[in-house]
Image (cartoon, grey):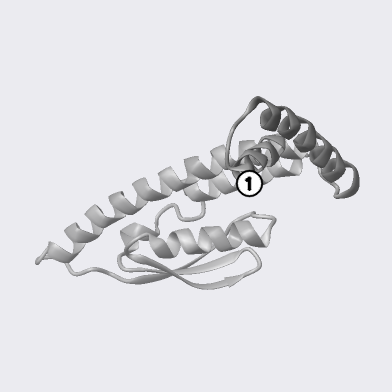
């Protein structure tokens, strides 16, 4: 947060001189102190946000990879003339504690080709899969493991 305050100071000034940088360092420190003292913020929360940012980037990479893999599988199912897809409706339980994590999981499943989250109540997910092969391992998917890890790290603060 301190670095963000400092960068904003430089951007708002529009130029970089020794005086602007020196005042910026002091003013950013004073603002950061104020935020920590009166707005329930801390260095620990800063570190947690940075860690969560790296986890979120990791999650987005995994999501992109899973979308790519599901697209290939889905093309194989659609182009196979000799075997018809067997749609299935699956209900599974995921031990996610926050609404945000549950919503992210539901949206990740829906973004993955061939699957749609139909219903979400508490920790019970109902997912429609275009083929029963896509339903395997939904409850222990990489998405669930990463979201549980992110929740665990967020709870340590």
Seen in the picture, residue 130 relative to 44 is either above or below; the reply is: below
Which residue lies under the disc numbered 1?
12
Residue 64 percent coordinates (x, y): 37, 49
Task: Check the picture and name the quadrant holding the C terminus.
Answer: top right
Horizontal arrangement in the rendering, residue 141 relative to residue 75 (left or right): right
Seen in the picture, residue 73 relative to 55 is either above or below; the reply is: below
Task: Check the picture and name the quadrant holding the N terminus.
Answer: top right
Q: Can I make out residue 85 in this image? A: yes
What residue do we see at 32% from left, 65% from top? 114
Q: Can I make out residue 149 in this image? A: no
Horizontal arrangement in the rendering, residue 157 relative to residue 21 (left or right): right
Residue 87 percent coordinates (x, y): 32, 71
Neighbour class for label 1 at 10 Å: few (<14), some, many (≥20)?
Answer: few
- Answer with the quarter of the image where residue 71 lies: bottom left
What residue do we see at 58% from left, 48% from top? 147
Judging from the image, what secondary structure is the residue with disc 1 in?
helix
């Amino acid at each position: 947060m301190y670095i963000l305050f400092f960068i904003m100071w430089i951007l708002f000034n529009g130029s970089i001189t020794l005086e602007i940088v020196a005042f910026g360092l002091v003013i950013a420190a004073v603002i950061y102190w104020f935020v920590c003292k009166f707005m329930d913020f801390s260095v620990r929360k800063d570190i947690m946000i940075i860690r969560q940012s790296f986890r979120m980037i990791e999650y987005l990479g995994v999501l992109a990879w899973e979308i790519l893999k599901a697209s290939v599988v889905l093309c194989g199912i659609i182009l196979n003339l000799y075997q018809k897809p067997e749609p299935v409706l699956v209900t599974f339980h995921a031990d996610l504690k926050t609404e945000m994590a549950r919503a992210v999981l539901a949206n990740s499943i829906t973004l993955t080709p061939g699957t749609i989250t139909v219903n979400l109540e508490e920790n019970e997910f109902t997912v429609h899969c275009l083929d029963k092969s896509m339903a395997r391992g939904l409850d222990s998917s990489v998405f669930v493991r990463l979201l549980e890890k992110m929740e665990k790290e967020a709870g340590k603060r």
